[in-house]
Image (tube, rainbow, N blue to C red):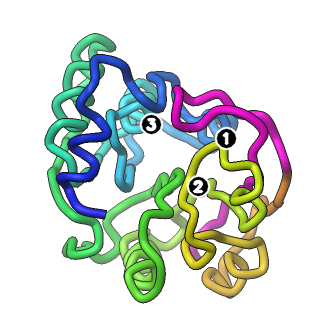
Amino acid sequence: MSASFWNERYSTEDYIFGTAPNAFLASQAALLRPGMRALAIADGEGRNGVWLAEQEMAVHAVEVSPVALEKARKLAAARGVAPTFEQADILDWNWPDAAYDLVAAIFIQFAPPPGRDRIVDGIRRCLKPGGLLVLQGYTPKQIEFATGGPSNPANLYTAELLRAWFDGWDILHLAEHESVISEGRHHHGMSALVDLVARKP
């Protein structure tokens, strides 16, 4: 999906995924420490990156849409925090080596293979040893619910797939479940989800 697609989607006064952080990300607050360096992938209008900054983390939020980034900057200013925002297509981004203590990958299922594989490789590379990945995504059953996310099954995750991608990592939490979510008008209702918290060896 191009920047123009996302610009059009974000061109509204509303925050289309809300301004509260993703509930699963927020539920992992006990793992976070002030001063940790965090990457928020495809952070949209900033709800997750801003929340991480409110936890006194040094946040780098990457997003392809300049329209979304402008809204993210406004949200950050209103909350009194200052994440580093970067406009970039994560599919072509130069992932740094061992740069982050935390990666937040929340509903980043905009790419099927092979683009998806490049993102996974980037996540594996950019975390420091001992760094944490917090990921939430949709499973294939989400297509039946149609309450958000992609319609292409190739974009969707299963627990088995995530375990294979992060083989050798310490899996702190991995679960598929069906839950009601309320994240703005684009993620709303009963949803088929998979949650992962993993520590890089």
User: Which of marks 1 and 3 precedes in the sequence?
Assistant: 1
- Residue name at image x 82 percent, y 40 percent: 179
- Residue name at image x 64 percent, y 32 percent: 188
In the image, residue 82 lies at what x, y percent? 22, 28
- Residue name at image x 66 percent, y 43 percent: 147
Which kind of residue does numbered mark 1 sit on? Answer: Phe
Q: CA distance from mark 2 to mark 1?
A: 8 Å
Residue 188 part of the magenta-drawn span: yes
Which kind of residue does numbered mark 3 sit on? Answer: Asn
User: Which of marks 1 and 2 precedes in the sequence?
Assistant: 1
Q: CA distance from mark 3 to mark 1?
A: 11 Å
Q: Quadrant of the C terminus?
A: bottom right
Q: Which residues are magenta?
A: 178-201
Say which residue label 1 marks: 24
User: Which of marks 3 and 2 precedes in the sequence?
Assistant: 3
Left or right? Give the position of 184 relative to 136.
left
In the image, residue 88 lies at what x, y percent? 17, 59
Residue 191 part of the magenta-drawn span: yes
In the image, residue 103 lies at what x, y percent? 46, 57
Say which residue label 2 marks: 134
